[in-house]
């Protein structure tokens, strides 16, 4: 029997704010344990929460970016559970009146052609709500210690509909969602720092069936690759159970990305009753049109929209746009350089092929580079004018990256400028090359334009590699036309 997987993701995203959601104490990562706390975080008697508007701004902005309906009124609820990472023994969250409803995340379907923008799909969202993060348990050999530095950090939970069917779709969804949050300045989404965490709900059913199968929740998917691998593992496991005549049990499983295996954590019968009720210390929040309009004006162009624009306006190949648009700073860098150079494709090639290579080798980020957009534009112009040849430009780029010097200064210092070519000398080299290759001459005359390249090698050899390629091409065509 053939089976179809049905997948929904619950993604927790830490909101990038200076202070925590219900208190002025700072957020942060890497501090000494339990130093980012105060009476509100530790739930000391008499300490009351005060709403952080910056956290509300962030979730409304996220909702606008993802096309959600922003609720005119949202409220806060207490989610009851008893665990050491929650000092209050409840979590302030949103239950029946979340701030964002619906919306979609656009993905590019796996298997699309490499050189053209492939088929896209929009994964529907159920809701996005805002809550406070909990502390972190650090487990030792004989004991566990709790660090409350993370407790109280504003946290968005983004819940998708069960609308994905492969591990690759889930990977594309999480990649696209992460980029949206980074583009919007909502979160840095560093999974190593716990700023983005994901649980997957997976079921399978016979192909053609519309009823959902028994759901298994997969936890501890602490990298985007582990999300993909864990889901693929769980789909395979569930199919194996059914093919052996077993039944799928509704449960929560822990996935170990290092070994590629999972184990049961708890069954349905052990599920918690959270006993939600409205938080008596926090008032409902009204979101009016003026508030939404202000945040809508701050929303950036999203990666796929930017890619479509780069393809249309700059006539860039798909491969270049795919490398440029997923990093907001890199896309802005490209546009600045392309505006200065007037040659978008050449500019994109230098950034994607050379700048990213040098940054990777040096283990630097774009912000650390000595090469500004103006450097790239100047190098493009040098090559386009024939002042330097492409091979020499490659050498210039490496030196420019290391020193931050302008490309013309590097070319002058290293003697890499193309030598001025005497027109009479160039014409003679061209005549000699044509005379030495009658076969290429006949092919060119018969309409094979690429045959002209057979003459260029001997000419460049005669010019010791420093002839202007544009002049060579122009001179050859003039002589060939009269031959």
Image: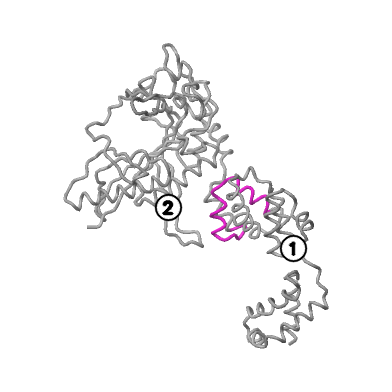
Quick check: 481 above or below 320?
below
Which quadrant, please, contains the C terminus? Answer: bottom right
Q: Secondary structure at mark 1?
A: loop
Residue bearing mark 1: 388
User: Magenta part mainly helix, strand or loop?
Assistant: helix
Q: Which mark is residue 347?
A: none
Left or right, 372 with respect to 2, comes to right
Identified at 44% across, 28% down, the residue is: 73
Identified at 25% across, 57% down, the residue is: 2
Identified at 27% across, 27% down, the residue is: 273
Front residue of 406 and 462: 462
Residue 191's x, y, as percent? 46, 39
- Disc 1 crowd rating (10 Å Cα; few below 14, some 14-19, many 20+) is many
Front residue of 156 and 405: 405
Identified at 24% across, 40% down, the residue is: 250
Residue bearing mark 2: 121
Front residue of 314 and 172: 172
Residue 181's x, y, as percent? 50, 40
Residue numbers of the magenta segment: 312-338
């Amino acid at each position: 029997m053939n089976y179809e997987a049905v997948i929904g993701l619950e993604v927790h995203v830490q909101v990038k704010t200076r202070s925590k959601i219900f208190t002025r104490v700072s957020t942060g990562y890497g501090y000494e344990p339990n130093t980012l706390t105060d009476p509100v975080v530790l739930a000391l008697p008499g300490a009351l929460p005060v709403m952080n508007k910056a956290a509300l701004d962030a979730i409304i902005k996220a909702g606008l970016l993802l096309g959600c309906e922003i609720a005119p009124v949202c409220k806060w609820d207490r989610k009851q559970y008893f665990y050491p990472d929650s000092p209050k023994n409840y979590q302030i969250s949103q239950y029946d009146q979340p701030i964002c409803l619906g919306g979609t995340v656009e993905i590019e379907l796996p298997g699309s052609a490499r050189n053209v923008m492939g088929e896209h799909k929009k994964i529907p969202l159920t809701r996005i709500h805002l809550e406070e993060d909990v502390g972190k348990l650090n487990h030792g050999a004989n004991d566990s210690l709790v660090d409350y530095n993370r407790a109280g950090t504003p946290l968005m939970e983004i819940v998708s509909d069960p609308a994905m069917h492969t591990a690759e779709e889930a990977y594309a969804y999480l990649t696209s969602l992460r980029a949206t949050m980074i583009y919007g300045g909502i979160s840095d989404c560093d999974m190593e720092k716990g700023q983005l965490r994901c649980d997957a709900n997976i079921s399978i059913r016979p192909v053609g069936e519309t009823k959902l199968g028994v759901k298994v929740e997969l936890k501890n998917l602490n990298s985007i690759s582990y999300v993909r691998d864990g889901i693929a593992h769980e789909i395979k496991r569930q199919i194996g159970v059914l093919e052996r005549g077993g039944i799928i049990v509704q449960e929560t499983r822990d996935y170990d990305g290092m070994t590629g295996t999972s184990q049961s954590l708890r069954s349905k019968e052990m599920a918690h009753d959270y006993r939600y009720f409205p938080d008596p210390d926090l008032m409902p929040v009204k979101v009016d049109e003026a508030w939404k309009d202000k945040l809508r004006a701050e929303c950036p162009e999203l990666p796929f929209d930017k890619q479509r624009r780069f393809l249309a306006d700059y006539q860039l190949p798909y491969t270049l746009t795919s490398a440029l648009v997923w990093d907001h700073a890199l896309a802005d860098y490209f546009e600045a350089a392309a505006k200065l150079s007037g040659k978008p494709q050449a500019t994109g090639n230098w950034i994607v092929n050379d700048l990213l290579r040098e940054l990777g080798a040096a283990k630097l980020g774009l912000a650390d580079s000595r090469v500004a957009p103006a450097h790239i534009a100047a190098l493009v112009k040098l090559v386009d004018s024939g002042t330097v040849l492409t091979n020499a430009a490659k050498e210039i780029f490496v030196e420019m990256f290391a020193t931050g010097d302008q490309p013309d200064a590097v070319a002058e210092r290293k003697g890499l400028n193309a030598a001025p070519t005497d027109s009479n000398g160039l014409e003679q080299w061209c005549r000699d090359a044509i005379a030495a290759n009658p076969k290429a001459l006949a092919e060119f005359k018969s309409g094979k334009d690429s045959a002209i390249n057979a003459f260029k090698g001997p000419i460049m050899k005669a010019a010791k590699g420093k002839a202007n390629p544009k002049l060579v091409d122009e001179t050859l065509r003039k002589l060939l036309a009269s031959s």
